[in-house]
Amino acid sequence: MSRQIISDDVIKRAKKIKLLLMDCDGVLTDGKLYFSESGESLKVFHVRDGQGLVLWHQAGFRSGIITGRSSEIVRLRATELGMHYVKVGSLDKTKDFEDILLNAKLNAEEVAFIGDDVGDIGILQMVGLAITVADCALEVEPYIHYKTILEGGFGAVRDVTNLLLNLRKT
């Protein structure tokens, strides 16, 4: 797999990041929704994304999820990974983002957000580093600074944590 060239703007923005937030479906998962016969929803997470978040936390940084779908599975995975902020069933992602900013005592330029679809555009316009996954909805692309080389649910979050951590070393 080829490496992409990182612009000076992305490098400058990335070095300020202290909090990594993301959508769930289409970012931490492949965006597909699986339902059992009893109506229980199932999600599949990539272990490398989880390891990337663990490394991010070990380096002293925080993370979180803001998602429009209500899901106990998301809460469980976020807890397992030690994520600091979890907003599921969000009816207003930008308001939830602003609440997290206040709680975290950070300004927007210190936050990166990974989104993949139109419901994420509001936050993407507000953060210091707006990121999307390789297989995002086309409508998102005008609002981003960085696009991962991997698709959502297939290591895209690890791509981001590697980028952020590696740029700290330069």
Image: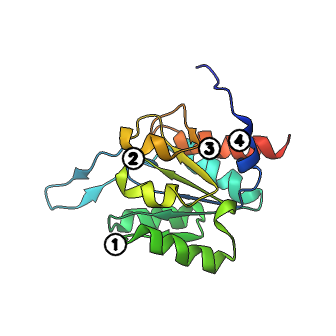
Query: How many numbered marks are there?
Result: 4
Question: Which percent across, then down, holds residue 127?
Answer: 59, 59
Instruction: Compare marks 2 and 4 and give the one earlier in the sequence.
Output: 4
Quick one: label 1, few (<14), some, or many (20+) residues within 10 Å? few
Q: Amino acid at mark 1?
A: Leu
SS at badge 4 = helix
Q: Is residue 152 visible?
A: no
Quick one: label 3, few (<14), some, or many (20+) residues within 10 Å? many
Q: Amino acid at mark 3?
A: Val
Q: Residue at x 75, y 56 (%)?
A: 16
Which residue is denoted by mark 4 in the rendering? Answer: 9
Which residue is denoted by mark 1 in the rendering? Answer: 91
Mark 4 → mark 3, Cα distance in angstroms: 15 Å
Q: Residue furthest right?
A: 170
Question: Which percent across, then down, holds residue 138?
Answer: 37, 38
| Quadrant, the C terminus | top right
The tag on residue 149 is none
Which residue is denoted by mark 3 in the rendering? Answer: 160
Instruction: Compare marks 4 and 1 and give the one earlier in the sequence.
Output: 4
158 or 81, nearer to the observer? 158
142 or 65, nearer to the observer? 142
